[in-house]
Amino acid sequence: MSGLPLGRPPLTGSARRSPLLSRLPLPVFVLAVALAVRGAYLLTAHGPAFDAPLVDADYYDSLGERLARGEGFPEGPFWQPPLYPAVLGGLYWLGGHSLWWPRLLQACLGAFTAALACGVARRISGRPGVGVLAGMLVALHGPLIFYDGELLATSLGTFLATAALWLALREPRSFWTALGCGACMGLGALTVAPLLLLLPPLAWALAQGRPVRAVLCGAVCAALVLCATAFNHARTGEWLLISANGGINLWLGNNADVDGAMAIRPGAAWETLVNEPARYGFHTPASQDAYFTRRALSWCGSQPLTCASNLLWKLRLLLMARELPRNEALAVVRSQSPVLWALTVSPGGVALPYALLWPLAAAGSVALWRQGRSGTVEARAALTVAGTALLLAAPSLLFFVSGRYRAPLAPVLCVLAALGLHALTSRAAPRGVPAAMALAVLGLSVWPMRLAVDAVDFEAELHYAVGGRRARLGDDVGAVEAWRQAVSRKPDSLEAGFNLGLALERLGRLDEAAHTYEALLRWHPDEARVHSRLAQVRNAVRHGPPASPVNP
């Protein structure tokens, strides 16, 4: 006997669904799940990395406050693309300075990104289930959820890139979709400059039947980007397309020691690198940007085989399952929320979600190619998705690989992964080639690699950055606490130890400052700055207070 009550027919799949769910559009369902997960993350997250924006995030936060006060951007051209700090400035002006405003906005953007990925996958597969799977992969993507909570341009850039792809594939195509797609790409480039690379495939997709749509898309995109160019030229008289940080980022990923360059941390080594052009007589932002660009291109031109090998090495890094850190390491901060902890697990050292996404996306690429050739999927749509994926991966190969720089690629990877899972579980087509591709990419994804950045103590770096933010805000007591934790983990840290001594001097705790400098000299006996401060502190203990040290 079955467990069904007598006299009642078995419930069908559709009958089991509630009337509300049966009427709920699938993208709305994905949107709701994604928003709920991001809300849970924001409500449960707590820790120094979440409570205090660090490094780039701290810069964006301070710039947003400046714009909210009506002071405008600092003198000179844009150092980083301007849209994200402008958005922060608008939020702070409307609602006051609170980290919750950008985080709530970004949670919504992340949820809409999931819904858009659902729409893209459904468009190219023709299957609602594949669309829902792609959307849910984005909704539950741990690194994307993490970046949605950070004061970085990543969340906004990822949303704009996904929205541009969705508009380019939307049926029926119209001048309005071309206008919207161009606007998304232009705004995306003003958020994360390499998103400008999306213009060729998406304009080509829109050109089908009416080439003028591609012209309109490109014109809108160019008009937005040229606003930044005109601003930079008006400020400096020099031509910079969007911002002045492209050259140094290009050099970081194209030199004789890329592995070591990627491990450079904020502090003396970074300042030495940034100030290098000035030592050779280049003092304007545009000339300094061009200096690093020339260095990178010159190295590639003089060492073409090594440069090509470097590109392959970066491709290998891009395919790695684990998140490569930039300002902070996800492996360190994931404990700040049980939601993030659960969505970034690494069973047996296999880091999710990319350990699943990359192999499935490889299988999905094979399936997409087959369907495009057979006519199951419109060939132009298939090529548009493939081209978008390649060009979203390109910045990591042209510049350097880190978790936050590959984040805009993640929604397209989720679309391909949903296609791949369907191809591997369906009997409609042979599964041998997709399965072989998935296994090969899985091996590359989880095969361990030892990198220079692995030697960095990112927990010490986290406390050092927290101390820097607290000192900037005038909280020397909090800065001392953070820098003490940094020094306890990394006693030879010159930057953390020296700034700890300065903060103790400002607080009048001269004996502690002297002990700090003495301990630092055991690691750096030839550091003139430390000797100078120690001498002044000892003199102050004997005769009176020294000259007040400046805030770092």
Image (spheres, rainbow, N blue to C red):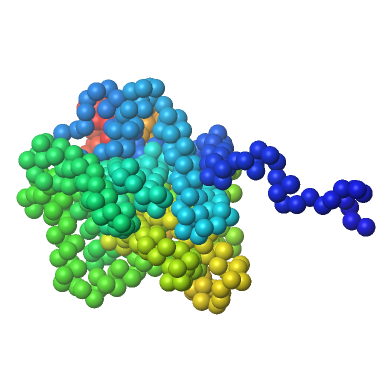
Q: Residue 427's image quarter? A: bottom right
Nearer to the camera, 297 or 462:
297
Above/below status of 325 relative to 46:
below
Question: In the rendering, at what x and y percent does residue 89 appear?
Answer: 31, 29
Residue in view at x 53 percent, y 39 percent: 35
Residue in view at x 17 percent, y 56 percent: 292
Whether residue 257 is visible here, answered yes or no, is yes
Whether residue 509 is visible here, answered yes or no, is no
Above/below status of 394 relative to 141:
below
Question: In the rendering, at what x and y percent does residue 46 appear?
Answer: 52, 36
Question: In the rendering, at what x and y percent does residue 286 appear?
Answer: 12, 47
Which quarter of the rendered picture does the N terminus lie within?
bottom right
Question: In the rendering, at what x and y percent does residue 261 appear?
Answer: 28, 59
Nearer to the camera, 493 or 422:
422
Above/below status of 306 relative to 122:
below
Question: Is residue 340 rendered to the left or right of residue 315?
Answer: right
Residue in view at x 24 percent, y 23 percent: 70
Question: Is residue 399 rendered to the left or right of residue 52?
Answer: left
Residue in view at x 32 percent, y 27 percent: 90
Residue extending farthest front:
209
Tell me how many marks there are: 0
Which quarter of the rendered picture does the C terminus lie within?
top left
